[in-house]
Amino acid sequence: MKPAVNFLTELRATLMLAFPIIVGQVGQMLMGITDSVMIGRVGTVPLAAAAFANGVCNLVFIVGIGLLLPVAVLTARAHGAREPRECAQYLRHGMALAAMVGGATLVLLFALATQLHRFGQPPEVIAEVVPYYLLMTVSLLPSFFFQALKQYSEALGHAKAPMAILLACVLLNVGLNWLLIYGHAGFPALGLAGAGVATLIARALSCAVLWWWLAHRADVRVEWPERWRGSLDGARLKEMLHIGVPAAGQWLFEAGAFTAAALMMGWIGTVPLAAHQIALSCAAFTFMFPLGLSSAVAVRLSKTVGEGRTAALRPIGFGALGASFVIMSCFGLLFAFAGGLLARGFTPEADVVALATQLLVVAGIFQIFDGGQVVGAGVLRGLHDVKVPTVITFVAYWIFALPGGYLLAFHTPLGSVGVWAGLAAGLACAAALLGWRFHRLTGAKTGP
């Protein structure tokens, strides 16, 4: 009975931390979903253009988030070891890292703006995408700063404020979309570009508000940097990059696979690309649940290591994996049996709805694996094990998922559905290998 009680106690603590993180992640994703829904009412071409631009920008965004993940992991460990000055320094260096990542992102994506025609997308999509693409690129800079602040706040146990701020910004984004996409209340009807302006404003405001909240909170003051200027500690940056670079690699391999899948959809046609955007928006929304759980379990495991409670590692990790299985099984059933209803919420175009419904059936199948692989990566990150998981994700997505999806899409009658079937195979491979890795590391010993 004692192990069962311990398991449930640890699971309850993980879920309590995960809940506001999940709500915050869902809020962030709702910003993209509301953009897709409201853009879809303008037409199929704008929706396809949004899918293409978001695919390119999100690939770089995911890499940046991966590089900033050490802020949460290392702050949580220092917080568990009762080292407030270390917490402050990890935030200061994390914000500096966010500035570096953001600057590099702007240079890269602005240079790429002149080469978008080389991705083989439909001409009508390329003709409309550039203004929206540039606005989304600029909006990444405040997003990186927000991510560093958010992870720091969650590592200290303050997950509700980022959640509330993100939800408020979703509502702001919807209101600005209504004004700027459609031209209500005397504003110009900017169409797709209007959605980009709305997202930029909402993201910048969310960063400013979270900074202000943390800087004025009394119980954070002891762990808040006393000064922001001054030289950076090379050893500390190296420690952060030791975790961040492999984590970024993991997310790059997965996000890159989905971006490549979007490109393959564009090769097939505008309707498949629009349908892909709908199915991906739904899958990305549900993915926020295990992603939030992954962030929470990484923080909890890192803090547990700092506290020296090594006996709790397996209950915490396997509890999170079990919770992910249950949550994503429910979403999988929803996609399988209500896919048509979900697709019609994005667009009235019958051909797009029909194809998106088929894609959502496949998405319903891989939901379980998607949750397992992201939580599996989180539990390993909490143990500071990042190199082997990076290899695992490369093999799963670029050896299995993409070649398999290409073969099924272009050399079998499956077509667009084959791309998603390949992704499902890659996710299943990653989930199995990451789960096995955690089992092996915490079996005979309690750490990597």
Image (tube, rainbow, N blue to C red):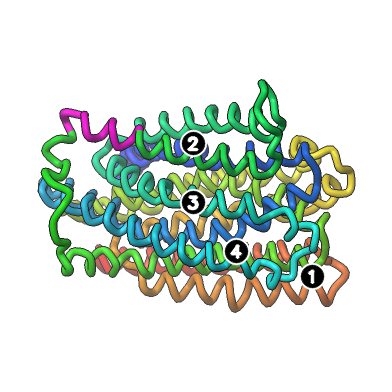
The residue under the point 68% across, 53% down is 51
Q: Quick check: 306 above or below 111?
A: above
Q: Indicate the amino acid at tag 3.
A: Val
Kind of element beneath mark 2:
helix
In the visual, does 372 lie left or right of 421? left
Q: Which mark is residue 259?
A: none
The residue under the point 29% across, 48% down is 300
Judging by the rendered image, the residue that carries numbered circle 4 is: 113
In the visual, does 447 lie left or right of 296? left
> Disc 1 and disc 4: Cα gap in Å?
28 Å
List x then y, in percent, for residue 388. 39, 74
The residue under the point 81% across, 74% down is 410
Kind of element beneath mark 4:
helix
- Quadrant in the rendering for residue 245: bottom left
> Disc 1 and disc 2: Cα gap in Å?
38 Å
Judging by the rendered image, the residue that carries numbered circle 1 is: 409
The main secondary structure of the magenta stretch is helix
List x then y, in percent, for residue 372. 51, 56
> Disc 4 and disc 3: Cα gap in Å?
12 Å
Boundaries of the magenta span: 209-219
Mark 1 or 2: the one toward you: 2
Judging by the rendered image, the residue that carries numbered circle 2 is: 202
**Mark 3 Cα-neighbour bin, 10 Å: few <14, some 14–19, many ≥20:** many
Of callouts 2 and 3, which one flags the residue occurring earlier in the amino acid sequence? 3
In the visual, does 331 lie left or right of 62? right
Is residue 218 magenta-colored?
Answer: yes
Q: Indicate the amino acid at tag 4.
A: Ala
Kind of element beneath mark 1:
helix
- Cβ–Cβ under 8 Å for marks 4 and 3: no
